[in-house]
Amino acid sequence: MNKRLNLALEKATQTKALVLRQGAINETARVFRELFPDERAVVIADKTTFAVAGKAVDAMLHQEGISVDAPVILDYPDMHAEWKYVELLDEVFSKSNAIPIAVGSGTINDLTKLSSYHNNRHYMVVATAASMDGYVAFGASITKDGCKTTFPCTAPIAVVADIDIISKAPADMTASGYADLFAKVPAGADWIIADAIGIEPIDPVPFAIAQDGLHDALSNPEGDREGRPEEISKLMEGLLLGGFAMQAYPKSSRPASGADHQFSHLLNMQHYVMPNGKAPSHGFQVALGTLASLFFYRELLNADIEKLDTEACVREWPDLEVQEQEAIRMFHGTDFPMLGATEVKAKYVDREGLRRELTTFKSKWPETRRRLERQIIPVEEAMQRLRLVGAPTLPEDIGLSRQRMRDSILLAQKIRRRYTILDLGLRMCMLDKWTDALFGREGIWEIKRPPINH
């Protein structure tokens, strides 16, 4: 492994072993025996991933003399990470002390992760696609009672990622992972502005784990689309590093997500499905949030921050009660009517606090601008790369109207207390202007108005 992965494993609080290379699946039994001597194993997979890798893993374990329970193959049509499957695995695990080996990607990993945690045991994963950054992240994203929620639980103790297998995954899964990795670009910028203002100082180790090598990992979307092993290896490494960065920063998922992910969280909370009745993948949702964030960063970098009228922004800043009432109105009739008010209160500052924030930001702008310019990939370039890899670049690519995407801007700002470009824009009285530009004639998602007949 390279230095970045070695550092990540050294700083990881939960994952102890990683094999990332071509032919890595052949190391599965060895890794299991080293971490779980004298323990039983059980393969968890779906019908597809069992055929791709699970059957081979099960056979290898038998050949190495490891005691193995019968594989658990979740063969259900249109299966997602839903609570009923967690309960199913809970029942299986309650009857055996076998160590689970999750063979799959997002759904299988999250279901196994949460059920293993429920049953107080470690697990390991054999990855089958570079589709998301959650392999070694703490927490599992599961739909319960119609609402997608991230449940706290520990990451796998080991990951086996065979590039030969991952390179053959469906192109849409690879595109989803590429988009999820691209989100680390604006997420890093969000942490830079939060650091500049003094709201959440950058922790250099997890920041470096997530960001070092990121631009290189995103440099060849066509190679990723074609499944070239050398490119898939870089993509998978980048996704794993995002999860390791979160292990190194146990406070939150800040190293790997910012405003980009808030759009995805909002769609999940709204139970959004495309016209075909299916929810778009996490990465495809995040792709649109990433582009919106990068557009806003373009506007920020083009703004004359030194001439920002701080006192005008302070005068226009609503007090907490007004902001809470606005949030309650905006989320009225949803499954989470008080969420906006709760998150607005958590990150609220009074007018004097806002004055200090904006004054600090202005004074640090020359340095912050340089940091952002090194971090940001221009939105036009991002659109081109996402298009080449096969990820969405327009709201309608996932069946979403541009008006609904526009309406999501303020809603997304209110569902998380994490400070992002959305919060900075709002506090500088620029978010409305940026949104108008995003959906206007100079924007990337122009909403064309019907002509006026005289």
Image (cartoon, helix red, strand yellow):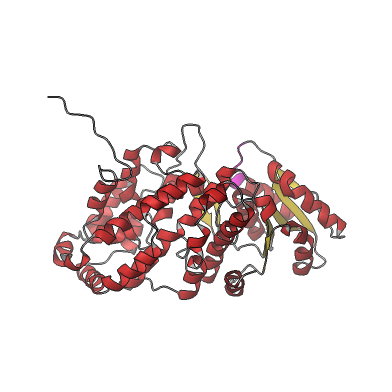
- Residue at the left extreme, as displayed: 454
Q: Quadrant of the C terminus?
A: top left
Q: Is residue 360 above or below residue 383?
A: below
**293 with respect to 253 (left or right):** left
Residue 433 locus on image (x, y percent): 22, 51
On whether residue 182 falls in the magenta region, the answer is no
| Res. 307 in view | yes
Q: Is residue 234 above or below residue 400?
A: below
The one of 153 and 230 positioned closer to us in this rendering: 230
Task: Identify whether 197 is placed above or below 152.
Answer: below
The verdict on residue 80 being magenta is: yes
Residue at image x 43%, y 54%? 261
The x, y position of residue 241, in whole percent, is 55, 64
* Closer to the camera in the image, 134 or 111: 134
Q: Which residues are magenta?
A: 78-84
The answer to whether residue 82 shows anywhere in this view is no
Report the predominant secondary structure element of the magenta stretch: loop
Q: Identify the image quadrant of residue 421.
A: bottom left
Return the residue found at the far top: 454
| Image label count | 0
Residue drawn 55% across the image and 43% down it:
172
User: Which one is nearer the viewer's eye here, 247 or 448?
Assistant: 448
Instruction: Give how far across and how far down residue 154 sits, in percent.
Output: 60, 63
Between 185 and 111, the one lying in front of the other is: 185
Q: Quadrant of the N terminus?
A: bottom right
Q: Is residue 437 left or right of residue 194?
A: left
Place of residue 116 in the rendered image (x, y in percent of width and height, measured from the top left): 66, 58
Which residue: 51% across, 65% down? 213
